[in-house]
Every structure is written in structure tokens, then in C-alpha cells.
């Protein structure tokens, strides 16, 4: 995956998370957890739907259970990495 594609994925994921958190994208730290952003379980579901639609991917249904899923939602950076992996697998 090229750096430009990675940057696009990062920017879009951050924008989705920022929208759910009612924040400006510049206020979203890559080290922040969903809890830090104020994203609750309902907003998480909406976030996942938005990510799936934006990137034409399927996030594992158990993404909120890190011991059962490779899709890590512990931080913004881990979500970006997980989306990058799914996007790369799609192509």
C-alpha cells in the first residue's frame, strides 16, 4: 500500500471518528482511545457502519472483543492499521 493510500485511509478514518465524537479532525489524536473521544457503544456501531461503507470492507462482527478479533479498536492508530489491512486485502 502506497504512502498516499495510507494517508487517505488515515484521514478518512480520523474524519469518521471526529464526526462521531463531534470534534474537529485536528482534535483527534492517533493515541486516543474511543473512550477518550467520547465514543460510546452506539457511536461505535455507527462508526463501524461508516467505515465499512466508506472503504467497501467488512469489519469483523466481534471487533469490540480484541481477544477474538484481529480488528483492534483500542486506539485511533490501531483502527487505522486495521482498516489499512482490510483495504489491502480487498485489492
Image (cartoon, rainbow, N blue to C red):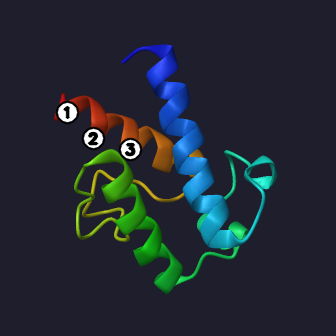
Q: Is residue 75 visible?
A: no
Q: How many marks?
A: 3
| Residue on which disc 3 sits | 82
Side of 57 where 31 appears, left or right: right
Furthest residue toward top: 2
Mark in front: 3 vs 1: 1
Furthest residue toward left: 90
Question: In the image, is residue 23 above or below residue 6?
Answer: below
Side of 5 where 26 appears, left or right: right
Of helix, strand and loop, which one carries label 2? helix
Q: Residues within 10 Å of mark 2 (few under 14, many from 20)?
A: some
Instruction: Please name the residue shown 55% across and 38% down the image.
Output: 10
Q: Residues within 10 Å of mark 3 (few under 14, many from 20)?
A: some
The quadrant of the image that shows the C terminus is: top left
Q: Are marks 3 and 2 in contact (CB under 8 Å)?
A: yes
**Distance between mark 2 and mark 1 Cα atoms:** 5 Å
Instruction: Please name the residue shown 38% across and 35% down the image.
Output: 84
Q: Are marks 2 and 1 in contact (CB under 8 Å)?
A: yes
Instruction: Please name the residue shown 27% across and 58% down the image.
Output: 59
Q: Quadrant of residue 52?
A: bottom left
User: Percent from the top left, x then y, of residue 37?
Assistant: 70, 68
The quadrant of the image that shows the N terminus is: top left
| Residue on which disc 2 sits | 86
**Distance between mark 3 and mark 1 Cα atoms:** 11 Å
Question: In the image, is residue 38 above or below residue 72?
Answer: below
Of helix, strand and loop, which one carries label 3? helix
User: Percent from the top left, x then y, of residue 33?
Assistant: 63, 61
Q: Residues within 10 Å of mark 1 (few under 14, many from 20)?
A: few
Of helix, strand and loop, which one carries label 1? helix
Q: Is residue 14 visible?
A: yes
| Residue on which disc 1 sits | 89
Amino acid at each position: 500500500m502506497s504512502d498516499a493510500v495510507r494517508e487517505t485511509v488515515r484521514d478518512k478514518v480520523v474524519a469518521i471518528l471526529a464526526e462521531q465524537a463531534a470534534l474537529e479532525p485536528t482534535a483527534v489524536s492517533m493515541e486516543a482511545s474511543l473512550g477518550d473521544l467520547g465514543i460510546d457503544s452506539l457511536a461505535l456501531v455507527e462508526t463501524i457502519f461508516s467505515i465499512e461503507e466508506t472503504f467497501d470492507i467488512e469489519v469483523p462482527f466481534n471487533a469490540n472483543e480484541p481477544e477474538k478479533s484481529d480488528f483492534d479498536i483500542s486506539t485511533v492508530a490501531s483502527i487505522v492499521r486495521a482498516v489499512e489491512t482490510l483495504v489491502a486485502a480487498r485489492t
